[in-house]
Amino acid sequence: MRKCAIFLFAFLIFVSPCIAGQQLDEANSKFTYSGKPIHPFVVKEFSNWLSDNRPPMITTVDVAAAPDTNKYMDSEIEKRDNWLFAKTEEMDGDVRLYESFGYHWIGRLANGVHVLETGSSGGGSGFFMDLMFVKFSEGEIFWENKKEKQLLMTIVGTYSLEDRYEGDIKINGNKVLIPASADQRGGGSNDKDIELNFPE
């Protein structure tokens, strides 16, 4: 019995880092976790209120803790073209409150940082958009008297695209090319091509 316990312990020590490494590789190559898209509301955790014009206040989330939770249900995810959306609706007295958030994974920079185009709506005509720059890492947390593996997603940069941006954003090395969108509807517009050089 003691030999079996020692073997099982050694097996878990060997396999757990391997599994964690596979999850990190999957996230970096496909922007998925366990074969499923990362929930839009997990990405939304990085978004401030529109009235709070400042860097993100939440900077790291555990992707591994989100699946199969009531807060981030897969059934809420809707795919539209290259975008993934989730929405919530609730009543506040006689008023129906609506919120939608979506993202489009554009790809990775040469330095490994992921580039996401995101957008949010509160039910009106506005669709307020940003670029988010995120990266993945492995971690551990001590929970219920044991250690749990984490897949941490950290935001390392943002750039506002204003309301209803319409351009086709491209990646070239560590540069992000944002085409002009002078005819975009809503407040603010990018009336000239912009090139972001992401710092090393």
Image: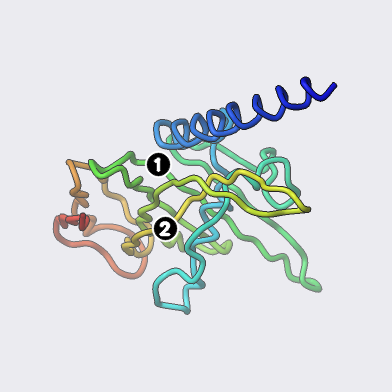
Local SS, label 2 = strand
Q: Amino acid at mark 2?
A: Ile
Q: Which of 125 and 112 lies nearest the eye of the viewer?
A: 112
The residue positioned 25% from the left and 44% from the top of the image is: 111
The local crowd at label 2, few if under 14, some if 14 to 19, many if 20 or more residues have their Cα within 10 Å, is many
Above-or-below relation of 66 to 119: above
Query: What colouring method underlies this structural image?
Result: rainbow
Residue placed furthest toward the right: 1
The residue positioned 15% from the left and 55% from the top of the image is: 195
Query: Can residue 170 be spotted in the picture?
Result: no
In the drawing, does residue 110 fall left or right of residue 122? left
**Quadrant in the picture for the C terminus:** bottom left
Residue 39 % position (x, y): 58, 44
- Numbered tag placed on residue 155 in the rendering: 2
The residue positioned 31% from the left and 40% from the top of the image is: 108
**Quadrant in the picture for the N terminus:** top right
- Numbered tag placed on residue 54 in the rendering: none
Residue 92 % position (x, y): 77, 71
The residue positioned 65% from the left and 61% from the top of the image is: 98
Local SS, label 1 = strand
From the image, tell me which residue sits under label 1: 105
Q: Which callout, 2 or 1, points at the residue further toward the start of the chain?
A: 1
